[in-house]
Amino acid sequence: MSTKIFLVALLFACGAGNSFYGSDTPPVNDVGIEYLGHVAVGVSDLTTAMHFYCDQLGLTEVFRINKPDGSVLLVYLRVNNNNFVELFPGAAKQTADSSNQTGLRHLGFIVKNLQETLHTLQKRGFTLPADAFEQAAVVRADGTYLSFMKDPDGNMVELSEFLPDSKEAKSRR
């Protein structure tokens, strides 16, 4: 099964409420959903994935759940108090471009300053494309700066910076 199925576009774009167990503000939809709490990502090598998501992107491990045989079932990583990423080791690596398949396309993180984030990633040993800083300085159709990269398994990860006039910034309630 493709690990891209587990990824979510702009996962953390919404203000996620004020506490872990619920928000002090009413839900923004009629079903009662307050925010997206986590996304699960299948990874082929847990050590390599932990290096990318923790050492390079800066997420922190919260806990692990083991299978009855003692092997790791999942690792829960904190983005903030309301948003998490679950890593599920043992997935098969992607073998081809699946951009035209159904399923979720990428994992999106919102950053305060995209240029600073890219410099930090570079200092932490992440190899950026030669034109990463130039591409990240282009205002996109939605009024944001963004940069795409791949995790060690080829899953797409988007880093976005909302500008004051971006569609996302204007849509916040």
Image (spheres, rainbow, N blue to C red):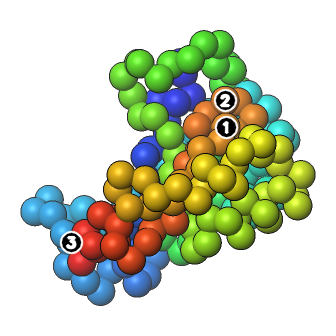
Identify the image quadrant of the C terminus: bottom left
Q: Regarding mark 1 in the picture, which secondary structure is present there?
A: strand
Residue that sits furthest to the left in the current view:
30
Density class for disc 3 (Cα within 10 Å; few <14, some 14-19, many ≥20) is: some
> Is there a contact, CB below 8 Å, between mark 3 and mark 2?
no
Mark pair 3, 2: CA separation: 34 Å
The part of the image, by quadrant, that contains residue 101 is top left
Q: Secondary structure at mark 2?
A: loop
- Tag 1: residue type? Lys
Identified at 61% across, 49% down, the residue is 135
Q: Residues within 10 Å of mark 2 (few under 14, many from 20)?
A: some
Q: Earlier in the sequence, mark 1 or mark 3?
A: 3
Q: Is residue 88 visible?
A: no
Which x, y percent locates residue 143? 38, 61
Residue shown at the point (83%, 56%) measured from the top left: 122
Q: Which residue is mark 1?
A: 150
In the image, 59: left or right of 102? Answer: right
Find the distance from the CA under tag 1 to the CA under tag 3: 33 Å
Return the residue nearer the eye: 39 or 57: 57
Residues marked 2 and 1 touching at CB (< 8 Å)? yes
Identify the disc placed on residue 154. Answer: 2
Residue 58: image quadrant is bottom right
Residue that badge 3 annotates: 27
Q: Amino acid at mark 3?
A: Pro
- Residue drawn at x 75%, y 35% is 152
Q: Amino acid at mark 2?
A: Gly
Q: Nearer the viewer, mark 1 or mark 3?
A: 1
Few, some or many residues within 10 Å of mark 1 (<14, 14–19, 20+):
some
Q: Earlier in the sequence, mark 3 or mark 2?
A: 3
